[in-house]
Image: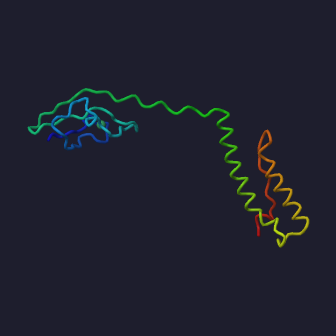
Amino acid sequence: MVTLECGYDDCSLYGIGREGPDDVAPDDERRVCGGLCEDGQRCGRVFDRLGANGEREHVESDRPEPPPPPPEPTAEEKKQAALFGLRQLRTAALVASDWTQLPDSPLTPEQKAEATAYRKALRDALGKKDPKLPDTPAFVLVR
Ligand SMILES: [Zn+2]
């Protein structure tokens, strides 16, 4: 057995030895360091190989290029994400006001009409150019 350890001191695995097989070559994926560097990127360099007699094999190696950042969402994707969120809020608002439509709800006829108009506005809200949910009547929130 040999000891494998990262020889780069900006790495979280620097100097932390681990047992490895004798036959592990520099291009063997078992010799690739999985530590994290101080900048948060993966180390990915080749472990030093320490023999039983303390001899060290060090292979100069570079860190892999960090993956490119994910592309910015397009205006259309942002719009779709906002619509998705609004649709969830709308569904929750409809569920939360279902009780106003029950025949035995304690609402006055005026409140009932307001609640019905509010629910219609909720249903129509997302088809508009600049979608926005209507304000919830106070009596819908306080039950
Ligand atoms: Zn490392």
In percent of width and height, residue 127 lies at: 79, 43
78 relative position to 49: left or right: right
> Residue 136, located in which quarter of the rendered image?
bottom right
Of residues 119 and 6, the one nearer the viewer is: 119
Q: Is residue 54 above or below residue 89?
A: above
In the picture, which quadrant includes the N terminus?
top left
Give the residue at x 73% y 60%. Answer: 95
Residue under the image location 37 percent in, 38 percent down: 38
How many marks can you see?
0
Res 94 → quadrant: bottom right
Residue sitting at 71 percent across and 49 percent down?
Answer: 87
- For residue 59, side relative to residue 101 (left or right): left
Q: How is the image coloured?
A: rainbow
The answer to whether residue 15 is above or below residue 114 is above
Which one is nearer the viewer's eye here, 20 or 17? 20
Position of residue 116 relative to residue 9, above or below, is below
Furthest-left residue in this view: 53
Q: Quadrant of ligand 1?
A: top left
Image x and y of residue 83, in percent: 70, 44
Locate residue 48: give its quadrant.
Answer: top left
Residue 112 place in picture, x, y as percent: 87, 64
Residue 8: image x %, image y %? 27, 34
